[in-house]
Image (cartoon, coloured by chain):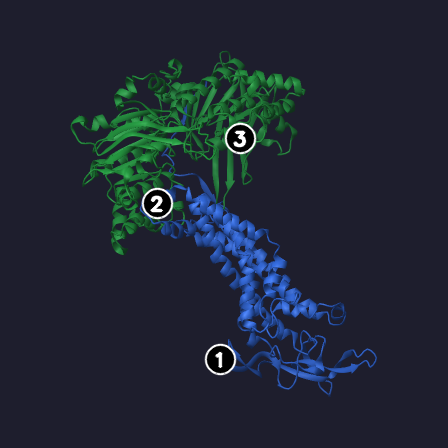
Amino acid sequence: MTVHPLSTGTQPAGDEAPIVLSVEHLSLDFRLRTEILHAVRDVSFVLRRGETLCLVGESGSGKSVTARALLRILDRNGAITGGRILLGNQGEEIDVAALSDRDPKLLQIRGGRIGLIFQEPMSSLSPVHTIGSQIIEALRLHRRMDKKQARAETIELLRQVEIPNPDKMVDRYTFEFSGGMRQRAMIAMALAADPDILIADEPTTALDVTTQAEILDLIKRLQVSRGMAMLLITHDMGVVAEVADAVAVMRYGRIVEAGSAEDIFHDARHPYTVRLLNSTVKLEQNQRTAARAETSTQARQPVLSVRNLSKVYGASSAWFGGNSHALKAVDDVSLDLYPGENLGIVGESGSGKTTLGRLILRTVEPSAGTVTYHGAGAPMDVTALSKQGLKAFHRDVRLVFQDPFASLNPRMTVKEIIGDPLYVSGKMRGAAIEARVAELLTLVGLDPMAMERYPHAFSGGQRQRIGIARALALDPKIIIADEATAALDVSIRAQILDLLLDIQQKLGLSFIFISHDISVVRYFCDRVAVMRLGKLVEVGTAEQICTQPQHPYTQSLISAVPNPDPRNKRMLHRTRYVA
Amino acid sequence: MLAHTFIEGTPETGPAVSSLQAGKPIETAVAGPWRLIWTKFARNKVALVAGVIILALYLIGLFAEFLAPALPDAARPQFTNAPPQELRLFVTEQDGSQRFQLHVTGYTMSVDQVSLRRSYVIDENAVVPIGFLVKGAPYKLWGLFPSDVHLLGPLKSTDTMYLLGTDKLGRDLLSRLIHGTRVSMSIGLIGVAISLCLGVTLGAISGFYGGVVDLVIQRIIEVISSMPTIPLWLGLAAAIPLSWSPLTVYFLITLIVSLFGWTGLAREVRGRFFALRGEDFVTAARLDGSSERRLIFRHIMPSLTSHILAVVTLALPTMIVAETALSFLGIGLKAPVVSWGVLLQDAQNVRTIAGAPWLLMWPAGAVVLTVLAYNFLGDGLRDAADPYES
């Protein structure tokens, strides 16, 4: 294998920003129970002042480990086996890889020279200290300020990360902040010591699209104004296109392709990069309109009708009469699902989309409203069903879960998992179950021989296939997929969506597809319902919602979705919705 | 700006790995959860040794009649508080030659006329030959199979052998200790079995249903665990009529001990149920149409079995200690039943400890060994219980 330089290898020194950090041939090994994993192999890149390098890759590609190696915060079973990490320091260079674990220089570098933002701000901020005290601590440590100075500086930092009323928020605790606010506080903390380099490890993955757009905006602006170098780690090609100057694509511990954002997105050479881009871009189109000409939905009888469905939490008459904190999770929602249709429900976290799914299945009892199911027999009022009736309803309407790791019982074999609904329904026993499980596994593209194995032997995508096979076991009419692809890598995501579309064609199912990911919904659904704060904001065909949204909230939501094309950055001219 | 570079060649299909030792192939064994638990457990050598000790103790208890040289109640008034005899291998013949013969030496006993204390001196000339699988006192194994074969004993059935000494009635301590093993080890098992049923059932119900049910069960647990145990045991044990047979008393004592031992297990199980009932796979099973009983026993319980096993292993020694304490205080098991606690009862006064320290040493040693072994085993099991952790 050879490394191919494409454009000119040596850059003219004049118009290039100075190098702050360069990684040369870095290799990392992890000692596992049965083998040695070469998590990072021969990785080289440079970070320049004022520029952003995006490290892209799917889970397990070694991108996070590489970033952690820069700060030398590896797990105990990991070790740097080769290469250098050169950190420029006013003329002289420090090799971070060669420092000993207890070197005082290392402590200076961590937090001082290199700031780090984690994916999950809740778990990286202490819940028992105020936001202020955590930032003040960093300031006192790294910039040797006294208490008063540090407090003033903290308030200034919070102002810079656009937290409103910073002089009040400084004394608040983490749990009083929303996800986006926490991430802002985390950024303020990373910036506290005025670092040269900012490492952001999936900083927006846990956030909603609109919040993601704001945070990315903020990071980008701060980076430019402070002239920091940034290493952004992400799996989302859309985010890369929006913020990257340079891109390095990692796979199985190696950088398979590196170059400017322009090179990578419009002149990709490595087959993996091409595939990654294809699966991202593919989701930008609607598969359904291409697959089916026109379905005059209005003329037909809906298979499921939801009327004025509401769920109120905390409103039940408490002992002391107070119900001022009633939360309307779902507020007066009416929907229709037609046979053979894919209905998408999109919304940000807290919009009530998951609760809506649970209300339809009645795993959560609705406060008001009706759900009517038009199955084989007479129309069923789901909200009035008895326990037995509900069981029959659950045979026709199935759920596919978000997390393929949590939704499969680790102590049961695949055969037992998929066969369980068959066994419980009393339809079949023994060899008949085995034959049906084999059939289902073939249908979802898995080897029937795998049925004796336990779920932990499968990858995320394979597990989701098992979950789908379980949902299909009882020949359902409707499948509710609750963020069914959210936990999967981009390339796997496209595969699973194609699988679902394929199965739908074969079995004539209807889907309710709940997702926060607009591109997935656009790819998969015929019609899309947009939810906000429990209310249905807009319903329309997927194409209309994505290209000509009517409601201002939908407009802001759609415009916040990152576009995987660096020539056409969508976020720069996005619209903001003010409620 | 970064120069555009890429790697050519066929794309790799998996992460790069190599074996721990160069040249050895990578093992990718497919193992079920129990297999994984076992491999993880087997790496903890201390726990493994503890497990072997526990197993050995149960085997001793199981074949107590066969392993004990004498009957536990066979008293010889002429040998009260006799010190332990040494097991020797060679006999010196009268002509001075040495001959292999397993034996112990006899005693000569003298009585101090003032204090009436007996003192024993080893008599080198009185050789008591010892053999394996000898005929001795007749017994019925498990009360069913009549036999008179003992693993180790004097060749002549009228001779005596006291490897660990005797008690104040001249009974062989070794035989009593072996018979005591049966009672002491099994009282833990039966006690824990009862606690297990109570704890798992109530904990599962409490954790699975939550709400009012949970509230009631938790308050009951709190009330029970807030009671001072020793006075309570004392009271309950004192209420047992003296006329009842030792066997009934034995079962009653187990019941009393276990009625207060289930609370910890119940809390543990409840906590795990609380965590697991919200898991997606439980919701999935519910939507599959599983009944609540099936949810509890088929879907949630298997995730707990290894934890329950670990908790039980840690609960066993507390049961054993509880029985020992009760019997030591004289309100637990009573003669003729033999348990370690009953044996320790003989070592209650300073005079015994000064004159016959073996009466304290061996039964106490047995209790300490068992409790330690159980704790190590339990720790090992608990660490191994979650095979998917690393």
* Disc 3/disc 2 C-alpha distance (Å): 35 Å
Left or right: where does residue B76 sit relative to residue A403? Answer: right
Q: Say which element carries label 2.
A: helix
Around disc 1, counting alpha carbons within 10 Å, would you say few (fewer than 14), some (14 to 19), or many (20 or more)? few
Marks 3 & 2 on one chain? no
The residue singled out by tag 3 in the image is A124
Furthest-bottom residue in this view:
B95
The letter of the green chain is: A
Furthest-left residue in this view:
A299
* Disc 1/disc 2 C-alpha distance (Å): 52 Å
The residue singled out by tag 2 in the image is B286
Which of the chains bears the disc numbered 2?
B
Furthest-right residue in this view:
B114
Image quarter for residue B343? bottom right
Looking at numbered disc 2 in the image, what kind of residue is underneath it? Answer: Arg
The residue singled out by tag 1 in the image is B145
Q: Position of residue A193 (x, y in %)?
A: 60, 21
Q: Could one spot residue A491 in this view of the protein?
A: no
Give the number of the disc on residue A112.
none
Asked if marks 3 and 1 touch (Cβ < 8 Å), the reply is no
* Disc 3/disc 1 C-alpha distance (Å): 68 Å
